[in-house]
Image (cartoon, grey):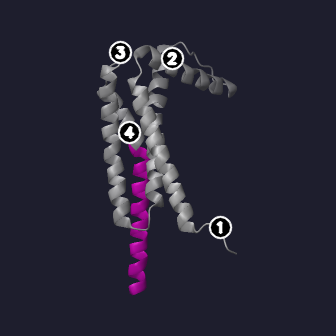
Amino acid sequence: MKTLFSKSIVKNIFVVIFFALFVAMSSAIIYFSTENAELSSQTSDKVGEIVAIVAESIGIKVDQNSDSFKNFIRKAFGHFGLFLVVSVNGVLVTLLLKNNPQMKRIVAYSFLGYGLILAIITEIIQTQAGGRSGQFSDVLIDYFGYIIPFGIFLATSFIIYRRNRKNCKQIEV
């Protein structure tokens, strides 16, 4: 049965989509880092309200006004979570590239470097936003969220590579 699009065209469309999401989410992170303290706090409060509604719907009592809850929301969603989402899109772009292991490796390491640069730049930007400061601990949280999907991708790729290499040696013998 013939299809309207070839597999390579569909694959390229997905590469473009995931790369566009990668760029859009990176831009959103930069935008959020430019917010002054009041706007940033309002954004965190809105996210906190949503998290509290979800938590309470499954029976978990949440005090939205506690400083520890607000700090958790800011770190888990505003830092770790956003960088994790950006990274997942980068991993998907890498996975969809042609079956060229060297190209995948170059792109993967480039994306890893990009994540660190993005984390550092957003914290520097925050030092210029009114009432905010950049924190080295936030760079670490950001980057940790960013490297988890890439760590899983690289570990999985390494395991598959080793398994395929071992299978090839068994066939030769």
Q: Which residue is mark 2?
A: 42
From the top left corner, tell me how far across and down residue 37 is, in percent: 41, 15
Q: Is residue 163 above or below residue 172?
A: above
Q: CA distance from mark 3 to mark 1?
A: 53 Å
Earlier in the chain: of badge 3 and badge 1, it is 1
Earlier in the chain: of badge 3 and badge 4, it is 3
Estimate how packed mark 2 is, as few (under 14), some (14 to 19) or many (20 or more) residues with alpha carbons within 10 Å.
few
Start-end of magenta stretch: 147-173
Earlier in the chain: of badge 3 and badge 2, it is 2
Foreground of the two, 60 or 5: 5
> Closer to the camera: disc 4 or disc 2?
2
Q: Which residue is mark 4?
A: 144
Q: Is residue 1 above or below residue 93?
A: below
| Label 3 element class | loop
| Residue 69 visible in the current orientation | no
Foreground of the two, 12 or 154: 12
* Amino acid type, mark 4: Phe
Mark 3–mark 4 CB contact (< 8 Å) = no
